[in-house]
């Protein structure tokens, strides 16, 4: 028995050198192991609808414009573009480029890509973000054929986009995956299966090589990308690291080179000199976390007094300053700061009240609505099972308990949580939203005609009318006024309870270069490289 | 000098009287077993410690200064012995002592109830299979074999998904998986019991099979069954911890030993007390059950050593 134990003990006492469990990288090549926080449901750029999906697919295609390492807009497939004087027609001029199977990329591929985006059969969750394009809303609703879409190709190198109203940020949004071109010949041949790794054809720096559910997505360099010579990494593997803390340990061991989530209340600990000081990257993000009330299935929540009471009773200062301490800020508005076209002027009417006053008022409102100790309000909060929601929802539960509301928590895996929200299978939903640069990208969520992404089924025709007016307003100051009024309606009606604005938190090995912190937490893969790339290629390090 | 007889003076002790009282007071086998059990030092200590833990689990949560679900906003991650939190607080400022006691209560409750479920199903199944024998026995045991080969966690997840996340359902789910070994043990014991003379006598007297099983077989199974019960309870507590570790167990703010250990393991570097205290309690509880089980087995069947 002792003899058998001896080698075990020797292995334990062997010293600090731990062999990292990285999958082998072919000789002379550079491979990056990327902790991606969630399992994607699709690799199709027009269908991707989550930050962890965008992280993978946004390098499969190059759109009209592209992002540099700091997420600024730069030319993509279009070398230059211009707007008509009234801002309603944009013309993009394309360079020569190829698909990964050698076929040339033409303007018709861009037309096809946008038609796919608004095709009701694609059912893209991102379509509503681009309704500024002429007739897109009608096409997406099935009322007009795809050919009616305001995107045309006068010749093989020119893309003409007509708009419903002036949209200054079209150039920025053209870099996003939903507006990328689609290979017509491939989609025609394979249908929905075209985006599987075996059939995928793209014009971007990387292509999907394999996708093993629950294990990883592997992407490899596309040699036919027009700037392929500058792309450093040969292979990137994306792992669905749902457990932030075990992913953190994998990054520490070198098994992963980076992870896109850090548990908020560990940020200060990781910054200590003896932990992982150079790894923590916290930066403001255009995103927010809020609780959505299901107005369709919970009669109690249809009373605005109940919703306001629930929203005002939450102690956001505790959550942000004591619980998280990870760069978040309390939210008293629907939109986070940092929008390119909006100044964030709306607030809840109780934003400046101290907590005691808010909780007393909440109790009064609930009593007025008929709820009290003899008839307590019972709710279920469904939340994502990741680190931060698991931490703050018990605090919300405790705050609601102090106003007499009995809340149960239901922890759900992230993808399933969002699917449940879209199916209306919840009472109160914890969700995050963000990543875009325009206010409409948030405000559209509460439009009555938005569909499943309006989780709670909020319907206010005056709100819709204000957003329509903003869409058609060319004067930017008047447009901002409409947006402000619309946001104030959301805050007064309280179909959602804002909780906090997100900070992006990434854990990146200091050896990785090209990862630039930015407001949109967008990090294009083609800029990533290793500090010791030369040694790695030679077989060391 | 004086002859033995009933006319002896009352109050005086004679050899006959003492012999009569000695003859009436016998020594049963259970007495023997109890004596052997308490001579086993480890088992004795375990009984006392476990008794204290059970009392703490039942009464403790009512006696702690802080309720287990109260978020103390100024006390996030406070260490042991600071202020009024005896063993510290967790990431939400909730008192760890209160949560530990409620977690112990939940784990023990799950252990006892699930074991009881497995006991009822297992004993019934095993006794019937063993007594009836033949084709029925083979069928019943093959079913046990098939269920044995199912991965436990898959089965529990299936039950929880079908019937929803009911706390009670967790008891049933775990019990429904643990009865298999109980059934096998009971069947084995039944097979040997049914050869005994008293069973033959009962059969000859015309007692129906159901009556024989109920009145002769089952009571004589008590020994091995009791031993196995004390060994199943820790297995069930571990299974419940496993489920909670995976997030399938109790929901917030309720907690169990497994959930406490899982959360404690996450924040190990920042707040080690969150891992240390629940682990100690779990280890001590499981060890107590195991020592008692071992002691009972030695006490009831000394020749099995």
Image (cartoon, coloured by chain):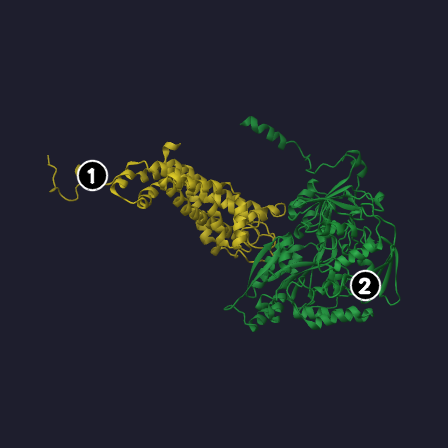
Q: Nearer the viewer, residue A65 or B221?
A: A65
Chain of the residue displaying label 2: A
Question: What is chain B's hue in the picture?
Answer: yellow
Return the x and y of residue A355 as percentages of the image width and height.
63, 66
Is B93 situated above or below A9? below
Quarter of the rendering containing residue B180: top left
Mark 1 vs mark 2: give the one in front.
2
Q: Which residue is mark 2?
A: A150
x 68%, y 37%: residue: A21
Front residue of B7/A442: it is A442
User: Observer-nearest residue: A323 or A55?
Assistant: A55
Q: Position of residue B150 (x, y in %)?
A: 52, 43
Q: Identify the colour of chain A in the image.
A: green
Name the side, left or right, on which A309 lies relative to A100: left
Mark 1 burial class by Cα count in 10 Å: few <14, some 14-19, many 20+: few
Crowd band around label 2 with a 10 angstrom C-alpha radius: few (<14), some (14–19), many (20+): many
Quadrant in the picture for residue A230: top right
- According to the picture, the residue beneath numbered tag 1 turns out to be B18
């Amino acid at each position: 028995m002792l003899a058998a134990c001896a080698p075990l003990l020797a292995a334990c006492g062997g010293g600090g050198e731990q062999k990292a469990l990285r999958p082998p990288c072919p000789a002379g090549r550079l491979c990056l192991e990327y902790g991606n926080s969630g399992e994607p449901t699709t690799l199709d750029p027009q269908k991707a609808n989550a930050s962890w999906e965008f992280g993978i697919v946004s390098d499969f295609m190059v759109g009209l414009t592209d992002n540099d390492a700091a997420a600024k807009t730069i030319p993509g497939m279009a070398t230059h573009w211009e707007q008509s004087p009234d801002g309603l027609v944009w013309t993009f001029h394309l360079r020569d480029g190829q698909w990964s199977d050698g076929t040339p990329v033409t303007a018709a591929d861009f037309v096809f890509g946008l038609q796919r985006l608004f095709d009701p059969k694609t059912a893209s969750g991102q379509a509503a973000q681009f309704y500024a394009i002429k007739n897109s809303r009608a096409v997406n609703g099935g009322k007009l054929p795809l050919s009616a879409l305001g995107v045309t190709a006068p010749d093989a190198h020119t893309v003409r986009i007509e708009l419903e109203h002036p949209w200054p940020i079209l150039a920025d949004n053209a870099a996003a995956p939903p507006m990328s071109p689609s290979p017509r010949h491939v989609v025609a041949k394979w249908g929905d299966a075209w985006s599987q790794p075996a059939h995928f054809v793209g014009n971007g720096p990387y292509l999907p090589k394999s996708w093993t559910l629950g294990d990883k997505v592997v992407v490899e360099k596309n040699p036919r990308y027009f700037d392929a010579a500058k792309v450093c990494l040969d292979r990137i593997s994306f792992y669905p690291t749902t457990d932030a803390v075990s992913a953190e340990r994998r990054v520490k061991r070198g098994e992963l080179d980076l992870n896109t989530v850090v548990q908020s209340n560990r940020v200060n600990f990781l910054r200590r000199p003896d932990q992982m000081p150079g790894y923590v990257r916290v930066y403001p993000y255009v995103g927010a976390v809020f609780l959505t009330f299901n107005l369709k299935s919970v009669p109690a929540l249809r009373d605005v007094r109940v919703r306001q009471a629930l929203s005002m009773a939450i102690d956001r200062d505790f959550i942000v300053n004591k619980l998280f301490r990870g760069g978040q800020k309390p939210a008293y508005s629907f939109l986070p700061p940092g929008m390119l076209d909006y100044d964030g002027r709306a607030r809840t009417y109780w934003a400046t009240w101290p907590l005691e006053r808010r909780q007393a008022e909440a109790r009064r409102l609930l009593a007025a609505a008929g709820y009290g100790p003899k008839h307590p309000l019972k709710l279920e909060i469904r939340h994502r099972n990741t680190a931060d929601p698991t931490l703050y929802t018990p605090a919300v539960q405790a705050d609601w308990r102090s106003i007499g509301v009995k809340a149960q928590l239901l922890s759900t895996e992230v993808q399933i949580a969002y699917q449940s929200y879209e199916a209306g299978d919840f009472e109160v939903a914890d969700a995050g939203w963000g990543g875009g640069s325009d206010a409409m990208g948030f405000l559209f969520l509460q439009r009555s005609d938005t569909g499943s992404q309006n989780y709670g089924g909020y319907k206010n025709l005056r709100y819709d009318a204000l957003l329509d007016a903003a869409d058609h307003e060319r004067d930017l100051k008047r447009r901002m006024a409409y947006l402000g009024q619309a946001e104030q309606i959301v805050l007064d009606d309280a179909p959602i309870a804002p909780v906090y604005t997100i900070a992006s938190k990434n854990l990146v090995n200091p050896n990785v270069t090209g990862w630039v912190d930015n407001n949109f937490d967008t990090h294009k893969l083609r800029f990533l490289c290793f500090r010791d790339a030369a040694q790695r290629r030679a077989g060391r390090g | 000098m004086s002859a033995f007889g009933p006319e002896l003076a009352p109050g005086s002790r004679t050899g006959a009287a003492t012999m009569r009282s000695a003859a009436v007071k016998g020594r049963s086998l259970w007495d023997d077993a109890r004596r052997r059990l308490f001579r086993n030092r480890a088992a004795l200590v375990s009984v006392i410690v476990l008794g204290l833990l059970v009392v703490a689990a039942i009464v403790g949560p009512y006696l702690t200064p802080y309720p287990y679900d109260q978020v103390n906003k100024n006390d996030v991650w406070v260490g042991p012995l600071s202020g009024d939190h005896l063993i510290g607080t967790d990431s939400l400022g909730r008192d760890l002592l209160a949560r530990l006691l409620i977690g112990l209560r939940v784990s023990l409750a799950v252990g006892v109830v699930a074991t009881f479920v497995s006991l009822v199903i297992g004993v019934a199944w095993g006794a019937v299979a063993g007594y009836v024998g033949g084709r029925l026995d083979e069928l019943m045991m093959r079913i046990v074999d098939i269920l044995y080969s199912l991965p436990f966690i898959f089965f529990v997840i299936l039950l929880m998904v079908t019937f929803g996340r009911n706390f009670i359902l967790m008891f049933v789910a775990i019990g429904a998986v643990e009865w298999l070994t109980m059934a096998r043990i009971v069947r084995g014991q039944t097979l040997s019991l049914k050869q005994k003379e008293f069973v033959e006598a009962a059969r000859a007297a015309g007692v129906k099979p159901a009556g024989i099983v109920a009145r002769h077989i089952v009571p004589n199974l008590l020994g091995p069954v009791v031993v196995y019960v004390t060994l199943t309870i820790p297995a069930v507590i571990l299974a419940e911890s496993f489920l909670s570790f995976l997030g399938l167990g109790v929901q917030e703010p309720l907690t169990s030993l497994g959930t406490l250990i899982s959360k404690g393991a996450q924040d190990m570097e920042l707040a080690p007390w969150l891992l240390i205290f629940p682990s100690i309690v779990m280890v001590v509880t499981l060890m107590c059950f195991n020592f008692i089980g071992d002691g009972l087995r030695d006490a009831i069947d000394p020749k099995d050593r």
